[in-house]
């Protein structure tokens, strides 16, 4: 069944209008035929409502939200709200979700200086909604009493630099092992390896995986 998409080029023109341009008009939504039928607008509205309420808890600081705690708190809900669907493999779906429903969330999260990459324009992995979903997708563990426990551990740099941008991060088994090693539950959020050490580890190509 159809799911909504917006191209990155159209989204960029809307989010970053040229000087002198009239009030930008929301890009026309196109549809891709695949997967089961879902009420995507209702899902997008629910996500935006939850995330904006969460941002009310994590108050802005110097024009931007203190991102680490917000993202840790948001990831499980984003993952549980979005259904398993082919749309989640299409970057243009995530652009639609970010632009049409979660623009205010992203603007509040990052402050006044709108960077299109946070909407997935340029590099899909930087889309805020996609990163929140992927963080849970890589670490969800049904064998735990709290299956999203690992998704809440670690800071933003750990997730972006040492999982999302590394090929071995696509292996859920390895991702869960690395999270558990670097952030053992018995010491809370205190990392086991120092920044230089974990960066050195991330540069290695682990041929045994």
Image (tube, rainbow, N blue to C red):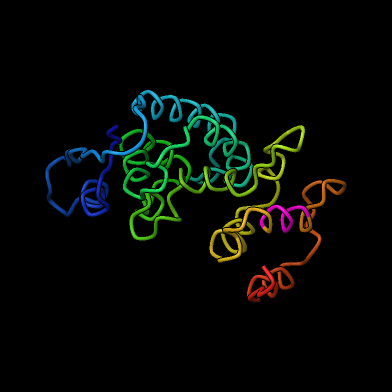
In the displayed structure image, the side of residue 86 where residue 143 appears, left or right: right
**Left or right of 123: which side holds 18?**
left
Residue found at x 40% / y 55%? 124
| Residue pictured at 39% horizontal, 60% vertical | 123
Residue 120: x %, y % from top left: 37, 52
Q: Residue 106, percent across and down?
A: 42, 42
Measuring 29% from the left and 32% from the top, which residue is drawn there?
1
Predominant secondary structure, magenta span: helix
Up the image or down, 56 lies above or below 189; here it is above
**Residue 122 belongs to magenta span:** no
When the figure is inspected, residue 71 is found, relative to residue 157, above or below; the finding is above
Position in image of residue 200 (x %, y %): 69, 75
Q: For residue 23, what is the image quadrant?
A: top left
Q: Position of residue 110 (x, y in %)?
A: 46, 47
Give, as a single range, the part of the protein colored magenta.
175-180
Q: Split into 4 quadrants, where in the image is the C terminus?
A: bottom right
| Most foreground residue, 188 or 83 | 83
Q: Quadrant of residue 199?
A: bottom right
């Amino acid at each position: 069944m159809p799911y909504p998409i917006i191209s990155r080029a159209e989204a960029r023109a809307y989010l970053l209008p040229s000087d002198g341009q009239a009030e930008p008009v929301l890009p026309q939504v196109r549809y891709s035929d695949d997967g089961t039928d879902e009420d995507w607008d209702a899902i997008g509205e629910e996500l935006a409502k939850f995330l904006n309420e969460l941002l009310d808890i994590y108050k802005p600081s110097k024009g931007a939200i203190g991102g680490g705690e917000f993202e840790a708190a948001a990831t499980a809900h984003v993952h549980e709200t979005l259904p398993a669907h082919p749309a989640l493999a299409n970057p243009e779906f995530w652009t639609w979700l970010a632009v049409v429903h979660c623009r205010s969330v992203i603007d509040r999260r990052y402050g006044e200086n709108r960077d299109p990459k946070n909407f997935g324009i340029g590099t899909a992995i930087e889309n805020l909604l996609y990163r929140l979903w992927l963080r849970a997708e890589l670490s969800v563990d049904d064998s735990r009493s709290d299956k999203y426990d690992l998704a809440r551990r670690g800071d933003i740099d750990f997730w972006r630099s040492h999982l999302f941008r590394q090929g071995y991060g696509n292996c859920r088994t390895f991702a869960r092992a690395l999270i558990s090693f670097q952030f053992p539950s018995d010491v809370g959020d205190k990392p086991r390896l120092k920044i230089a050490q974990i960066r050195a580890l991330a540069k290695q190509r682990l041929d045994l995986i």
